[in-house]
Image (spheres, rainbow, N blue to C red):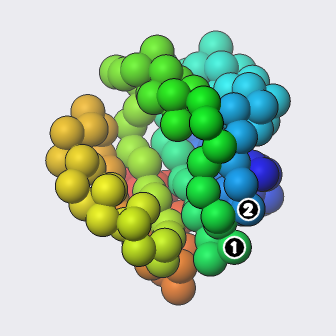
Amino acid sequence: MIEQLPSLPAGILGFRMRGLVTAQDYENIMVPDIEAAFALNRKLRLVIHIGDDFTGFAPGAMWDDVKLGFRHISGWERTALVTDVGWVRVMSSMFGFAMPMHFRLFADAELDEALRWVSST
């Protein structure tokens, strides 16, 4: 399941992933919000929170994530990933350097700090 993070500053999108994340979650929640934001802005800032109740990605979900990222490859200005999920942290640490944006990994307890960082100039 993907849900929007509420009450974020203007120009920042945020999503929380819980339980099993499916391709339909991407298509119904993230893609419309991100496409609408890109229609108004050249660059986007993003916060993704993957909580302890996250159980994984269903087949096809990761592919939707990759397609969405590459469709707007030059449009991601700053992305904060907030999670304590071990394998997600390892994968993000391994591949974060290759992302064409400012990317930073935060622990669950650092959600407020992540929001400050994404909002900063």
Left or right: 74 as drawn, with respect to 16: left
Left or right: 37 as drawn, with respect to 3: left
Count numbered badges in the picture: 2
Residue under the image location 69 percent in, 73 percent down: 53
Say above or below: 107 vs 80.
below
In the picture, residue 37 is in which quadrant?
A: top right
Name the one closer to the observer, 25 or 99.
25
Residue 120 on image: x %, y %: 41, 57
Res 116 visible: no
Q: Secondary structure at mark 2?
A: strand
Residue farthest toward the bottom in the current orientation of the protein: 109
Residue under the image location 71 percent in, 54 percent down: 20
Name the one closer to the observer, 120 or 72.
72
Residue 121 on image: x %, y %: 36, 51
Residue 15 on image: x %, y %: 67, 51
**How packed is label 1: few (under 14 Cα within 10 Å), some, or many (20 or more)?**
few
Q: Which residue is mark 1?
A: 53
Residue 80 on image: x %, y %: 44, 56
Q: Which residue is mark 2?
A: 19
Residue farthest toward the front in the current orientation of the protein: 59
**Which amino acid is tagged 2?**
Gly
Name the one closer to the observer, 38 or 66.
66
Residue under the image location 53 percent in, 85 percent down: 109
**How packed is label 2: few (under 14 Cα within 10 Å), some, or many (20 or more)?**
some
